[in-house]
Amino acid sequence: MGTVDELTERLAAALAELPQGERIAALNRVRGRLHEVSPLREHPVDFVEWVPAETIRGNDYNPNTVAPPEMRLLAHSVLSNGYTMPIVAHDGDDGRVIVDGFHRSRVGQEIAAVRASVKGYLPITQIRADRADRAARIAATVEHNRARGEHRIEAMSEVVRMLYQAGWRDDKIQQELGMDADEVTRLKQITGLAELFAGREFSEAWEPREREIAT
C-alpha cells in the first residue's frame, strides 16, 4: 500500500495529468471523501469544493446590502488576496442556494478578472444538515451578517415576519438572531402586521429616536 506520504504523492501525480475540468471535479471528490473520515467533519469549512459559478444563486431574504464602493473594495480584495472565505450554500431540490456570501458570489460571477482567476468556479461549503430548513437558513444568514455589520431595518423586519410565520416565537427569534426582546418587538411593529402581536399586550409604544446633530 505504501506510506501516507507515498500515496499522497501518487495521487497528486495522477491528478496533475488530468485536464482542468476533470482535475477540479476529481479534487472535489477526493476532498469529499477525506471529509467523511475527518475528525473535524462537523464543521462545514472542513470541506470546501469548487463549483461552476452559474450553479449557485442568491436567496430571496438576505437583508444585507453592500454599497458600490464596498463592492469595488471586495473585488479588489479578492483579486489581491484570493478567496479567503468560502460561500456558504444549501444544496436543495431547486439547486444550490446561498446562505452567506452573496456578494462574494457576485464578484466571482460579474467581475471578469475575478471570474478568470477562478476559472469560472466559486468556492462553497455546505451548511449543516440540521440548519437546512428555510427558517434555519434565514437565521443563519442573519447571524453571519450581524457578526459583520448592520442590516437595513425594513429588511430585518421582513426577516422577523417570515420567521414568525414559519412558527418561530419571540424567544427563539431572540436566541437565533442575537436580539433582545425590545429589538424583536420594534421590528415586529415595523411590519404593521397585527398577527405578530396576537394574544400579546404592550403598554409602551415605540418611536424611532431622532438622530442627534452635532453642533
Image (tube, rainbow, N blue to C red):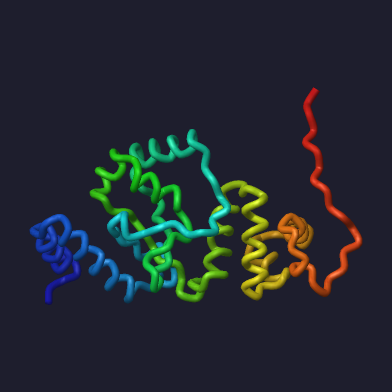
Which residue corresponds to the image point at 87% horizontal and 55% vertical from the top-left? 205
Q: Is residue 124 left or right of residue 139?
A: left
Q: Is residue 127 above or below residue 83?
A: below
Return the residue nearer the eye: 16 or 5.
Answer: 16
In the rendered image, which quarter is residue 189 located in?
bottom right
Which residue corresponds to the image point at 66% horizontal and 62% vertical from the top-left? 160
Total marks in image: 0
In the rendered image, which quarter is residue 142 located in?
bottom right
Residue 180, position in %: x, y?
74, 60
In the rendered image, which quarter is residue 90 located in?
bottom left
Residue 88, position in %: x, y?
43, 60
Q: Is residue 61 above or below residue 2?
A: above
Query: Which residue occupies the extreme top position in the image?
Result: 215
Residue 118, position in %: x, y?
27, 48
On the rendered image, what quadrant is the N terminus found in? Answer: bottom left
Return the residue nearer the eye: 98 or 84.
Answer: 98
Return the residue nearer the eye: 157 or 141.
Answer: 157
Q: Is residue 119 above or below residue 90?
A: above
Q: Is residue 15 left or right of residue 59?
A: left
Q: Is residue 205 left or right of residue 186?
A: right
Query: Which residue occupies the extreme left position in the image?
Result: 17
Q: Is residue 55 above or below residue 82?
A: below
Residue 134, position in %: x, y?
53, 70
Which residue corresponds to the image point at 27% horizontal and 66% vertical from the top-left? 31
Q: Is residue 106 left or right of residue 209?
A: left
On the rendered image, what quadrant is the C terminus found in? Answer: top right
